[in-house]
């Protein structure tokens, strides 16, 4: 009996410890970055240009770059992703074609992001002659985001009860109108959650933008989409591996990491909030 | 608007929606064609035998994927050694033991771990894990395979925990109740009934985690030291396929052997992740069938 | 509606002209210098934006060839193979030497060694000499910190010494990583551009004096020796550009040639062209 008891306790400890370790990982990551990063955060840091060969000053162009980049990604990926999800959930009947589409989406989601980078390089930079630009990079991230947006949107559409669709269809309303006036408004919070989560991923991606348009440094801001751009994740990579005075710019790197993580968390929190509000409304 | 034009719009949109569905197929096909057409051009210039049997990646003279492949598997399997036990045990704790409130608290935390950008994890590899490893093992430089494995384990954990937890949760209550009724205690039930029943799902979780680890670029690029020799142990620097593409793609003139070579190694990576996803998919389907 | 907006945005953005940016790419050695130059240039001319990216010298020339750069920084002169590619695509290029650089060979400052011959450098880098005991009184394997094959510095060192690098040489992403690694690695040996071992950066490092055959030992920090071309590992830093783009980039090149430009180059640890 006693041995069994000890065994049970041991088991319990093992399970608890592994969970604790996972939590520990997260706390170490956040603690290390935030504790060293917050000291370099200031209004000046997020609102000014890098100075003195990027050893001083702020990260404004990187923030602007990331925001614009995510904006282009959204413009591209959301309409396509939502339309595709509508097709799959509202129109597609079980058939070979539907199965192939679904299989493609699953496989697209599993492709390493660097391969999207290669594809973006081959398609947007070379074939379509967009050059290395924020447009090419945004579209590449859009392709990367597509499968996630499709999957989350489809799930949101699935949660809309069929009775609603049937009721409007019975009134003689066409299917597109039903989707536009009934299904989409109902599914909107769910779609929004998925979109925001996907964008938070896209904003943190580095590999796909490496050779599609990100730059080390740009000495001004321009709204044109065929410019190169700075981005937060790449800026962090550059400051921590490429800069000529790595030790000197460590505080800037920590600051950039903090801003990047806060941005991503902010998007996540917004998504959780939308989801939460929606759930409570449904109840 | 009259009915006719409304119906026309209806048909038009149906057509558009279907078109976007087809775009996903086109995208996958496009990626496939891009990778393999360029790889074929590569194999016109370098023999596949050299590519698969050589031992050096030294662009412009020797193109062998072997050191890169060994490096990639080193880092990826190392990460699985850390992440799999940790992930599955955590999932078991979350679904079987944790009080409801703690569960509600821990789940978003693990999701947060997934949200941290890979470049931030790689940064920690440089500033925290690297120096740490250097001290613990008394080596000069902590940028090596072990560093990459630890970081990739952290990145794969959320995937493994979430999917394993779903798998364990999906085991019908009746299984557990039957086992408990037969006199088995909570632990015996967990380890001998619930986890075996969830096994296909757990394999799917591991494979999807592995897929994530294999395809990760920035973390390994920053943390593993990038020496393109075949590693002898976990404390050697390695250079994975993804890191090689990231380092070299920007700098090659288009349409040269080196350029094609990068597509060839990308094609191999693509195939590997495709196969892993495929098997993972198979197991999670089996789980679904098993429960329905 | 969304589709229409989308198509509108795409077509608008794709059509807008790109003449207002100069893209400078390549050469990890020159990138920080280029960043400072671009930063100061902006004060004089804010109509012309300059974007700078690093990578290796190969990256700059490849980008120039691929149409993704206007100026290719390169710490080595163009290779014949690259020249052939430019000819093949019918692109006429020109070059401009804007500064002089010297390669510094560095070790940890704890290592009892001050100078080294070019012959020994070659032996270490090609893997023939693997232990410090052959050069110093310390018995310790040598860890080589080098650059990646895309680096002009890598090519330069490889060609001037006429060697193949040992496959166990760590291939670091940039000069800065080599320095960071050697600071904490007593067994390290590496090569970096002299601009990277300037002020404050060189703490914990030793910059070796180099001699070739029977010549005098010279430090890469010796401006006089460099000016007279006596240091074995000294090289010009190039900027390549397409002839047809000269008009667009001229303001920037002029800025580099100006006295302000020369001052920036010197302050960054490089040597101005005489």
Image: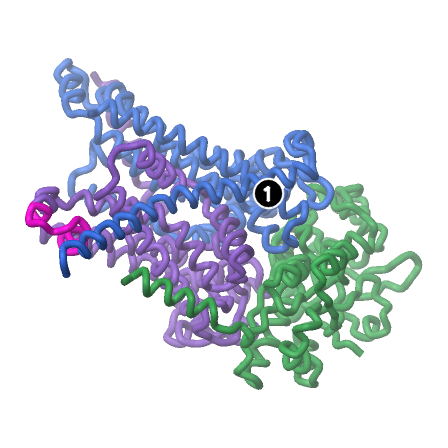
Chain colours: A purple, B blue, C green
Quarter occupied by residue A10: top left
In terms of depth relative to the viewer, which is nearer, B3 or A139? B3
Which residue lies at the image location 62% right of the left edge and 44% below the top edge? B260
Residue B77 percent coordinates (x, y): 48, 33
- Identify the residue position indicated by label 1 in the image: B38
Residue C180 percent coordinates (x, y): 60, 57
**B208, above or below C200, in the image:** above
Asked if residue C62 is among those painted magenta in the image, a careful observer would answer: no
Viewport quadrant of the C terminus of chain C = bottom right
Viewport quadrant of the N terminus of chain C = bottom left
Q: Which residues are magenta?
A: A167-182
Q: Main secondary structure of the magenta part?
A: helix
Crowd around label 1: few <14 · some 14–19 · many ≥20 (10 Å):
some
Image-based side of C171 in relation to A278, left or right:
right
Image-based side of B27 in relation to A279, left or right:
right
Which residue lies at the image location 42% right of the left edge and 54% below the top edge? A141
- Which chain hosts label 1? B
- Tell me, yes or no, if residue C107 can be seen here: yes
Query: How many numbered marks appear?
Result: 1
In terms of depth relative to the viewer, which is nearer, B79 or A144? A144
In terms of depth relative to the viewer, which is nearer, A181 or C75? A181
**B158, above or below B127, in the image:** above
């Amino acid at each position: 009996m006693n041995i069994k008891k000890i065994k049970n306790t041991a088991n319990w400890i093992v399970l608890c410890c592994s969970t604790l370790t996972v939590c520990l990982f997260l706390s170490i990551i956040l603690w290390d970055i935030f504790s060293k990063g917050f000291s370099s955060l200031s209004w000046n840091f997020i609102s000014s240009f890098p100075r003195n060969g990027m050893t001083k000053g702020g990260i404004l162009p990187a923030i602007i770059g990331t925001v614009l980049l995510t904006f282009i990604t959204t413009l591209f990926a959301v309409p396509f992703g939502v339309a595709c999800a509508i097709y799959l959930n509202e129109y597609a009947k079980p058939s070979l074609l539907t199965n192939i589409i679904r299989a493609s989406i699953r496989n697209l989601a599993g492709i390493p992001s660097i391969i999207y980078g290669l594809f973006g390089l081959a398609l947007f930079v070379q074939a379509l002659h967009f050059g290395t630009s924020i447009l090419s990079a945004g579209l590449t991230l859009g392709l990367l985001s597509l499968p996630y947006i499709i999957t989350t949107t489809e799930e949101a559409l699935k949660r809309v009860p069929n009775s609603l669709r049937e009721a409007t269809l019975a009134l003689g309303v066409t299917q597109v109108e039903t989707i536009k006036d009934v299904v989409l408004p109902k599914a909107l919070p769910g779609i929004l959650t998925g979109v925001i989560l996907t964008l938070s991923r896209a904003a943190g991606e580095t590999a796909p933008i490496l050779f599609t348009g990100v730059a080390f440094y740009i000495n001004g801001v321009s709204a044109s989409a065929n410019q190169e751009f700075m981005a937060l994740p790449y800026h962090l990579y550059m400051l921590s591996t490429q800069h000529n005075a790595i030790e000197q710019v460590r505080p800037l790197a920590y600051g950039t990491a903090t801003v990047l993580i806060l941005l991503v968390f902010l998007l996540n929190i917004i998504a959780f909030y939308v989801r939460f509000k929606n759930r409570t409304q449904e109840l | 608007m009259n009915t006719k034009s409304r119906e026309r719009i209806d048909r038009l949109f149906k057509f558009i929606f279907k078109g976007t569905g087809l775009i996903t197929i086109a995208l996958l096909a496009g990626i496939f064609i891009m990778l393999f057409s360029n790889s074929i051009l590569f194999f016109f210039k370098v023999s596949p035998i050299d590519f698969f049997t050589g031992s050096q990646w030294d662009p412009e003279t020797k193109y062998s994927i072997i050191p890169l492949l060994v490096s990639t598997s080193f880092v990826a399997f190392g990460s699985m050694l850390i992440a799999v036990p940790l992930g599955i045990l955590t999932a078991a704790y979350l679904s079987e033991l944790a009080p409801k409130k703690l569960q509600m608290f821990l789940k978003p935390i693990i999701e947060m771990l997934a949200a941290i950008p890979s470049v931030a994890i790689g940064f920690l590899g440089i500033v925290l894990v690297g120096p740490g490893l250097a001290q613990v093992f008394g080596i000069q430089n902590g940028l090596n395979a072990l560093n990459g494995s630890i970081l990739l384990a952290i990145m794969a954990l959320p995937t493994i925990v979430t999917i394993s937890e779903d798998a364990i949760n999906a085991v019908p209550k009746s299984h557990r109740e039957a086992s408990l009724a037969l006199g088995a205690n909570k632990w015996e039930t967990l380890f001998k009934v619930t986890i075996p029943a969830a096994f296909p799902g757990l394999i799917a979780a591991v494979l999807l985690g592995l897929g994530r680890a294999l395809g990760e670029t920035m973390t390994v690029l920053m943390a593993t030291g990038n020496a393109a020799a075949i590693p002898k142990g976990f404390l050697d620097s390695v250079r994975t396929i993804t890191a090689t593409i990231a380092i070299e793609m920007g700098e090659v003139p288009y349409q040269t052997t080196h350029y094609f070579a990068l597509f060839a190694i990308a094609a191999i990576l693509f195939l590997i992740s495709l196969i892993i996803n495929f098997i993972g998919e198979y197991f999670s389907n089996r789980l679904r069938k098993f429960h329905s | 509606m969304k589709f229409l907006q989308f198509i509108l945005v795409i077509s608008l953005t794709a059509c807008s002209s790109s003449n207002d940016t100069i893209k400078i790419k390549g050469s990890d050695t020159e990138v920080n210098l280029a960043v400072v130059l671009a930063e100061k240039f902006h004060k004089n001319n804010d109509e012309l934006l300059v974007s700078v990216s690093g990578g290796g010298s190969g990256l700059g020339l490849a980008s120039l060839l691929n149409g993704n750069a206007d100026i290719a920084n390169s710490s080595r002169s163009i290779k014949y193979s690259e020249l052939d590619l430019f000819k093949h695509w019918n692109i006429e290029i020109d070059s401009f030497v804007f500064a002089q650089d010297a390669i510094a060979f560095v070790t940890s400052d704890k290592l009892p060694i001050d100078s080294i011959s070019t012959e020994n450098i070659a032996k270490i880098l090609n893997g023939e000499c693997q232990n410090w005991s052959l050069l110093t009184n310390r018995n310790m394997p040598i860890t080589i910190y080098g650059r990646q094959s895309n680096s002009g510095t890598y090519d330069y060192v490889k060609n001037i010494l006429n060697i193949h690098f040992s496959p166990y040489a760590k291939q670091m992403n940039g000069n800065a990583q080599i320095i960071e690694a050697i600071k904490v690695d007593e067994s390290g040996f590496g090569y970096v551009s002299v601009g990277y071992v300037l002020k404050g950066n060189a703490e914990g490092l030793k910059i070796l004096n180099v001699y070739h055959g029977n010549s005098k030992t010279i430090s890469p920090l010796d401006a006089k020796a460099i000016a007279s071309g006596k240091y074995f590992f000294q090289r010009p830093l190039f900027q390549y550009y397409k002839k047809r783009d000269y008009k667009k980039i001229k303001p920037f090149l002029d800025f580099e040639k100006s006295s302000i430009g020369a001052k920036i180059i010197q302050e960054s640890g490089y040597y101005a062209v005489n």
